[in-house]
Image (cartoon, grey):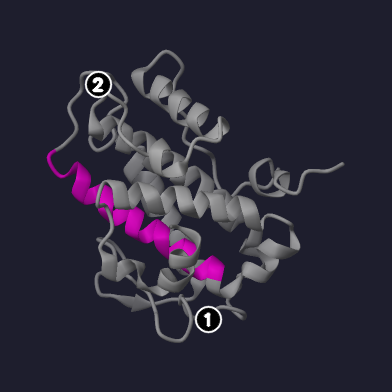
């Protein structure tokens, strides 16, 4: 019997390479602990809490990379259906439009198609999490003072992927039989950002009704 979840997480066509934690490092051990909690079916609200004796920045860093990998793969599964024609504007329904801004080509908020916006978004996050000055991999190397500020921007942007996928492409997720897994990933993400106050409540508005039903 084929597992529909493999279409999301074991798909040959991944959206981009995963960032991995090196075995033997403190982050790898934290990553394993976080995964073990999820695999054991621990309540997600408890699973996101900072383990005793661990540094919050380390715990946050591990989760940011993990969420990037997971959300990146979720988008990868529907990216063939998210086109310039189907999604000419990066939006979350008629009330919410997201405009792209960065330090290079788009210095002012710019309206883009969803695929263009999401490619820029994933590229930008990939650069951040692979930047040793922001996400140091060596134990003992301190995190920069603006670490949480960068993390909040990353997570706010990742949330927009959920918004677009849920509002514009959820029929595709359902068709693949992956609804339960995507919902679990969303709940895990939501409980985590709430636990550490990493996304403004205003940013969460587009999925407010769904979240109130799903996350008690």
Q: How many marks?
A: 2
Q: Is residue 187 left or right of residue 136?
A: right
CB atoms at circles 1 and 2 under 8 Å apart? no
Q: Is residue 150 magenta?
A: yes
Residue 120's label in the rendered image is none
Local packing at callout 1 (Cα closer than 10 Å; few below 14, some 14-19, many 20+) is: some
**Which residue reaches farthest front?**
216
Horizontal relation, residue 142 to residue 180: left or right: left
Q: Residue at x 48, y 81 (%)?
A: 93
Q: Where is residue 52 shown, x and y percent of the image?
A: 27, 24
Out of 216 and 91, give the one closest to the viewer: 216
The residue that mark 2 highlights is 53
Residue highlighted by disc 1 = 88
Where is residue 90 shown, x and y percent of the image?
A: 46, 75
What quarter of the picture does the C terminus occupy?
Answer: bottom left
Please identify the quarter of the rendering in which residue 174 is found: bottom right
In this view, 105 is above or below 41: below
Q: Residue 95 lies in magenta, yes or no?
A: no
Q: On the rendered image, what quadrant is the N terminus found in?
A: top right
What's the magenta bit mostly, secondary-structure-wise?
Answer: helix
Q: Position of residue 108 (x, y in %)?
A: 25, 74
Instruction: Point out the stretch of residues depicted in magenta.
Output: 145-166
Q: Residue at x 36, y 37 (%)?
A: 130
Measure the alpha-carbon separation of dots 1 and 2. 48 Å
């Amino acid at each position: 019997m084929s597992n529909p979840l493999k279409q999301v997480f074991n798909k040959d066509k991944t959206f981009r390479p995963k960032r991995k934690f090196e075995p033997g490092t403190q982050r790898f051990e934290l990553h394993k602990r976080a995964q073990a909690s999820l695999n054991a079916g621990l309540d997600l609200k408890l699973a996101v809490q900072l383990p005793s004796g661990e540094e919050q920045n380390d715990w946050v860093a591990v989760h940011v990379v993990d969420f990037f990998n997971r959300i990146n793969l979720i988008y990868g599964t529907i990216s063939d259906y998210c086109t310039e024609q189907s999604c000419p504007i990066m939006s979350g329904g008629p009330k919410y439009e997201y405009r792209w801004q960065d330090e290079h080509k788009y210095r002012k908020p710019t309206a883009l198609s969803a695929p263009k916006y999401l490619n820029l978004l994933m590229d930008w996050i990939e650069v951040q999490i692979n930047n040793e000055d922001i996400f140091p991999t060596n134990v003992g190397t301190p995190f920069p003072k603006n670490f949480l500020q960068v993390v909040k921007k990353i997570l706010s942007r990742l949330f927009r992927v959920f918004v677009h996928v849920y509002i514009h492409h959820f029929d595709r997720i359902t068709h693949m039989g992956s609804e339960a897994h995507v919902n679990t990933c969303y709940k895990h993400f939501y409980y985590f950002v709430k636990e550490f106050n990493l996304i403004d409540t205003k940013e969460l508005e587009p999925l407010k009704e769904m979240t109130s039903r799903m996350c008690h």
